[in-house]
Image: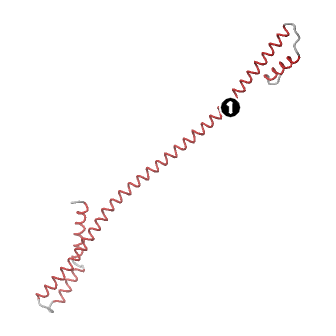
């Protein structure tokens, strides 16, 4: 027998006992009719009336007990299934919360990465600016060296240094020294 059938039978027994036992409407009706019919009709007629009434009442109580027990058993079984469903929904909600927390952590990590990359890009730009300045410094030094060599070459050869060349050389040297000479 299935779970519903066994539960149904147990509840049915309890309901039928409660419906037909002592101090019930069934017993009160039986006692009332038995008392009222005594002496009014023959014993044979009284038994026939009581049998018909009791059959009808017993059938109705039995049908009602069966329907109630089936309904209660079904509700009990459904309650268990509903509880299982609710537990699954709770687990699903917990999983969704964990997923949401994971997404939050992922987004925070991604934001930190983007911030670090942005900062790194800023540092790269600073490095590029420094490299350009260093290259410009090297070019100015090379220019000053070249102009100095040319100027000293004129002077060493006993040739007068052109005034423009001398000014250009001094300006080039001044560009590579912080305060000039």
Q: Position of residue 2 (x, y in %)?
A: 23, 60
Q: Position of residue 100 (x, y in %)?
A: 49, 49
Q: Count numbered badges in the picture.
A: 1
Given residues 169 and 7, the one toward you in this image is 169
Work out whether 67 lies above or below 54: above
Is 106 situated left or right of 37 in this image? right
Given residues 17 and 71, the one toward you in this image is 71
Circle 1 packing at 10 Å, graded few (<14), some (14-19), many (20+), is few
Residue under the image location 11 percent in, 90 percent down: 42
Work out whether 12 lies above or below 164: below
Q: Where is residue 21 in the image (x, y as percent from the top left)?
A: 21, 76
Residue occupied by mark 1: 126
Please identify the quarter of the rendering in which residue 87 is found: bottom left
- Name the quarter where the C terminus is drawn: top right
Q: Position of residue 145 (x, y in %)?
A: 78, 16
Is 112 situated left or right of 140 in this image? left
Please identify the quarter of the rendering in which residue 10 is found: bottom left
Residue under the image location 57 percent in, 40 percent down: 112
Secondary-structure class at tag 1: helix
Please identify the quarter of the rendering in which residue 124 is found: top right
- Name the quarter where the N terminus is drawn: bottom left
Is 173 situated left or right of 105 in this image? right
Is 47 situated left or right of 84 in this image? left
Rendering colour mode: secondary structure
Residue under the image location 67 percent in, 29 percent down: 128
Work out whether 101 lies above or below 161: below
Q: Residue furthest bottom?
A: 40
Work out whether 52 lies above or below 133: below
Residue under the image location 71 percent in, 27 percent down: 132
């Amino acid at each position: 027998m299935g779970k519903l059938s066994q539960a149904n039978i147990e509840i049915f027994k309890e309901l039928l006992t409660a419906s037909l036992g002592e101090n019930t409407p069934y017993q009160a009706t039986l006692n009332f009719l038995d008392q009222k019919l005594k002496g009014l009709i023959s014993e044979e007629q009284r038994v026939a009336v009581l049998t018909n009434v009791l059959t009808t009442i017993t059938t109705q109580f039995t049908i009602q007990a069966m329907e109630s027990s089936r309904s209660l058993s079904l509700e009990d079984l459904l309650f268990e299934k509903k509880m299982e469903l609710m537990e699954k929904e709770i687990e699903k909600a917990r999983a969704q919360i964990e997923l949401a927390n994971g997404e939050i952590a992922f987004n925070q990590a991604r934001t930190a990465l983007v911030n670090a990359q942005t900062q790194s890009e800023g540092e790269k730009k600073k490095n590029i600016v420094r490299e350009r300045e260093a290259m410009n410094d090297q070019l100015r030094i090379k220019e000053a060296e070249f102009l100095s060599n040319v100027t000293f070459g004129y002077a060493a050869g006993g040739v007068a240094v052109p005034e423009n060349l001398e000014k250009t050389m001094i300006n080039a040297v001044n560009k590579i020294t912080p305060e000039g000479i």
